[in-house]
Amino acid sequence: MVESSRRHTALALYGRFVSQSIRGPLQYRLSFFLMAFGYFITSGVEAVGVWALFDRFGMLGQWSLAQVAFLYGIVNVAFPISEAMARGFDVFGDQFVKSGEFDRVLLRPRSTVLQLAGYEFQVHRVGRLVQGLIVLGLAIWMLPVDWNGWRVALLLFTISSGVVFFYALFIFQAAMSFWTVDSLEIMNTLTYGGVETGQYPLAIYEPGFRRFFTFVVPLGCISYFPAIAILGIEDPLGSSRPMQALAPLAGYLFFGMSLVAWRFGIRHYTSTGS
């Protein structure tokens, strides 16, 4: 009963954090719309690049434009949601560890994860989200797929798994800042670089690369494998349908591992001394 009350209080507090973060930018609506439109255009250039690739070569192995657009849409719907919510972890090294602000966070009678999660909700990331939804919608319209209940459910499950997976990458990035504040570029290869990788079929990459993004950083589990099941095509890597359908669970497992790494980092945090 007490634990349930604490969770309800934490969710209510997080809701207040998010509400304040949304109201602030909307007070300057022109600036908000310009920033959102900028993200829409910037990410749209990536989509044009994918189209240009297929316009030149026709197919990517056995993959059509609509199938790759489906993968692209899944990743680019999930990522901007997590990016909007994980700003506190994204800037943790510079704005909390270097400045000593994290010492103050530790003194507050609230979870450090909750405080960083509510640090800033970047609502202008909606520009990239809209672009991803448009591409995903076009892919669904182009694909000859029977959209029954289980396919819709698996698609939603996959997107939600993608959100928590990318959020976990931001938490891992923040956890690394307990030992080095110069870890940002290393983690960018997994966050923003992971978005680029996930937009294309895992089967086109080298075996070592595929294993890394399946068993170490399970990017393929929140895009490629469930997409194969939804599209109803055979996986050239030989995965089974049950494995493909259950693969998004890896995103939630990865998120749990990121929280373990976060707690481990806090136990070894030695403060700035200022």
Image: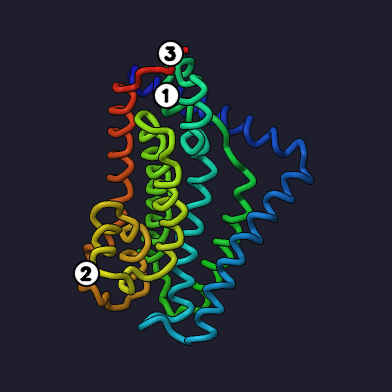
Label 3 element class: loop
Three-letter code, disc 3 = Gly
Above or below residue 98? Residue 163 is below
User: Disc 2 vs disc 3: which is toward the camera?
Assistant: 3
Vertical relation: 257 (above or below) 229: above
Q: CA distance from mark 2 to mark 1?
A: 39 Å
Give the residue at mark 3.
273
Q: Whole-percent x and y of residue 41?
A: 66, 61
Name the secondary structure under disc 1. helix
The reply to whether the C-beta atoms of the residues labelled 2 and 3 are less than 8 Å apart is no
The amino acid type of the residue labelled 2 equals Ser
Q: How is the image coloured?
A: rainbow
Q: CA distance from mark 3 to mark 1?
A: 19 Å
Q: Is residue 243 above or below residue 18?
A: below
Residue type for callout 1: Thr
Q: Which residue is mark 2?
A: 239
Q: Callout 2 environment at 10 Å: few (<14), some (14 to 19), or many (20+)?
A: few
Image position, residue 244 (x, y; %):
27, 64
Q: Residue at x 64, y 58 (%)?
A: 40
Crowd band around label 3 with a 10 angstrom C-alpha radius: few (<14), some (14–19), many (20+): few
Which one is earlier in the sequence, the residue at label 2 or at label 3?
A: 2
Q: CA distance from mark 2 to mark 3?
A: 52 Å
As rendered, which of 183 and 224 lies closer to the eye?
183
Q: Quadrant of the N terminus?
A: top left
Closest to the camera, between mark 3 and mark 1, is: 3
Residue 171: quadrant of the picture: top left
Q: On the picture, is 114 further left or further right than 61? A: right
- Judging by the rendered image, the residue that carries numbered circle 1 is 112
